[in-house]
Image (spheres, rainbow, N blue to C red):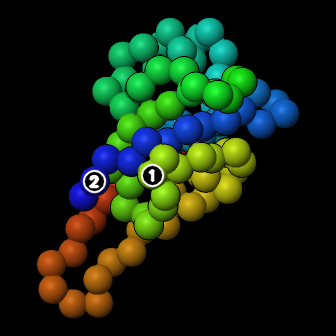
């Protein structure tokens, strides 16, 4: 599976979808310091976009590369869908956060 560059652009409330936390978060100094800074997916500020961040991770969805996410609610919802093959080996994903 290929690594996908995700450009997460803040909405009007300064929110983005955070894959690490699997939730919608405020992109503020606290988020950047406590989570982005130590995250292996974090790839820095997004060039060409105000109030944004770039993350790189293996995305199970079929998306463009780079994938620009401008609606954190939509991005969150799309990342909750997990497809299971009808037969054969299956990849089970789970999270400990709700």
- Indicate the position of residue 46 as horizontal and vertical percent values: 56, 27
Please provide percent x and percent y for residue 29: 62, 9
- Looking at the image, tell me whether mark 1 or mark 2 is earlier in sequence order: 2
Between 20 and 9, which is closer to the camera in this rendering? 9
Label annotation for residue 2: 2
Residues tagged 1 and 2 counted as in contact (Cβ below 8 A): yes
Given residues 48 and 12, the one toward you in this image is 48
Q: Residue at x 33, y 78 (%)?
A: 84
Residue 50, image quadrant: top right
Instruction: Where is residue 48? Give x, y as percent.
Output: 64, 28
In this view, which residue lies farthest toward the front?
48
Residue 97 is left or right of residue 76, and the answer is: left
Residue 1 on image: x %, y %: 24, 58
Badge 2 local density, few (<14 within 10 Å), some, or many (20+)?
A: few
Is 42 drawn above or below residue 34 in the view shown? Answer: below
Q: Residue at x 37, y 61 (%)?
A: 60
Residue 95 in view in this figure: no
Q: Say which element carries label 2.
A: loop
**Which quadrant of the view contains residue 5?**
top left
The residue that mark 1 highlights is 65
Name, please, the residue furthest toward the left: 89
Cα distance between the residues tagged 1 and 2: 10 Å
Taking depth in this image into account, of 44 and 13 the one nearest to the observer is: 44
């Amino acid at each position: 599976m290929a690594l996908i560059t995700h450009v997460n652009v803040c909405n009007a409330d300064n929110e983005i979808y955070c894959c690490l936390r699997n939730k919608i978060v405020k992109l503020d100094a606290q988020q950047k310091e406590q989570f982005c800074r130590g995250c292996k997916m974090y790839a820095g500020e997004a060039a060409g976009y105000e109030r944004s961040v770039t993350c790189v991770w293996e995305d199970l969805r079929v998306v463009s590369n780079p994938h620009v996410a401008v609606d954190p609610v939509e991005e969150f919802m799309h990342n909750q869908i997990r497809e299971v093959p009808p037969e054969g080996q299956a990849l089970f994903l789970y999270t400990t956060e709700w």
